Image (cartoon, rainbow, N blue to C red):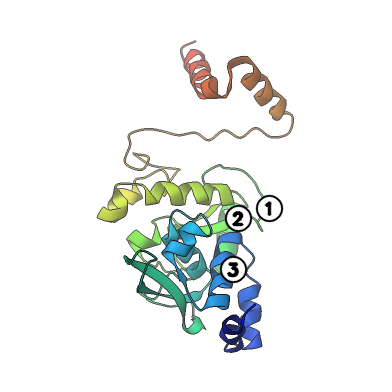
Amino acid sequence: MNYSQIKSMKKYSKDILKRLNDIKDKRPSTVIQHILKHGFITTEELEKLYNYSHPPRAARDVRERGINLVTYKVKSSNGKTIGAYKFGDPIFIDNKISKVAGRTALSDSLKKALIDKYGSKCFIYLQQIDEKQLQVDHRIPYEIGGEQDENEIDCYMLLSPSANRAKSWTCEHCINWSIKNIEFCEHCFWAHPENYTHIAGEEGRQIVITFTGNEIEDYNKLIELVGLEKAEETIKDLVANYIRK
C-alpha cells in the first residue's frame, strides 16, 4: 500500500472503516475496497480491472448497502468523458432518502414481515430456502418506480440470490428500462409471478421447475436421455400429452 492509499484510508473513522469492511459480497466489496485505496473508481476501471460489463449495477449494489455513492464525470485513458464513483458525505445514509441520493437499503423488519406472511421462499422459483439467503427486492424496479413505503410490504418480494440476479439482468435489458412505464412492470412476470400478462415485454408464461432430493435422479436421467438443450421441449411435450389424455 502506497502513501496515497494510506492517506485515503486515514480520513475515515474506525467505525466507518469497520462498517465498510464488514460488507463481504463480492461486487459491492470490490467497489468499496477500491475507493478506500484510491479515493474513487471509474466505470473504465470496473470494466477493465474487474470485468464488470455493467458498472452502474455495481454502483447500485453499493448503494443498496446504505452507502452514499456520488457519481461524477472524469476523463478515461483515451480522453473520453466517463463516470466515476466516490463516497459522499456522510458515507452512510439514513433509510429515508430521495431517489436522487440513491436507493434505500431495505430493512430487516421488512424482510421479516414478508417471511411471516409468505414463508421463507423465493417468489420466482417457489423454493423454500434458508431465510438468511433470501433477498428483498422492489417488485417494480427502483429505477422505474422509485422508493416504496416499507409498510406496504406487497410492493416488495423475496428472491433467492440467483433469482435476484436473473431479474436484475432481465429488467436492465428490457425495453421498459428506458421508457419507465410503471404499469408495464405491474403486469410483468418478474414483478408479479403470481399474476402477469407478459415476461419483460414478450408474450409468454413461465414455470420454474427445481429438482431436489430424490428428484435429482429423475433430472439426471432426463438429461441423459434427451440432452440439456431438448429438456425444456421434452417437458412441454409431456405436459401437452398429459392434458390431451
Circle 2 residue? 134
The residue wearing badge 3 is 108
What SS does tag 2 mark? loop
Res 153 seen here: no
Circle 2 residues within 10 Å: few <14, some 14–19, many ≥20: many
Q: Which is more toward the observer, 230 or 141?
A: 230
Judging depth in this view, the residue of 227 and 99 nearest the camera is 227
Mark-to-mark CA distance, 1 and 2: 7 Å
Location of residue 225 in the rendering, given as x and y in whole percent from the top left corner? 63, 15
Most extreme residue toward the front is 78
Counting residues from the N terminus, which is met first, the one under dot 2 or under dot 3?
3
| 157 relative to 199 in the view: left or right | right
Residue 100 visible somewhere in the drawing: yes
Label 2 near label 1: C-beta < 8 Å? Answer: yes
- What is the C-alpha distance between the residues marked 3 and 1? 15 Å
Rendered image: mark on residue 98: none
Residue 33 image position (x, y, % from top left):
59, 71
Closer to the N terminus: mark 3 or mark 1? 3
Q: Where 77 sits versus 39, above or below?
A: above
Q: What residue type is disc 3 on?
A: Asp
Task: Look at label 2 and name its amino acid.
Answer: Leu
Q: What x and y, as percent, mark residue 14?
A: 66, 86
> Could you say where residue 137 lies in the image, as x and y percent from the top left?
49, 58
Image: 106 above or below 93: above
Write the residue at 52% across / 60% down.
49
Which kind of residue does numbered mark 1 sit on?
Asp
User: Which residue is disc 1 drawn over?
Assistant: 130
Q: Quadrant of the N terminus?
A: bottom right
**Residue at image location 57% in from the left, 57% down from the top:** 135
Look at 34% across and 50% down and name the residue there: 185
- Considering depth in this image, is 203 or 36 the residue closer to the camera? 36
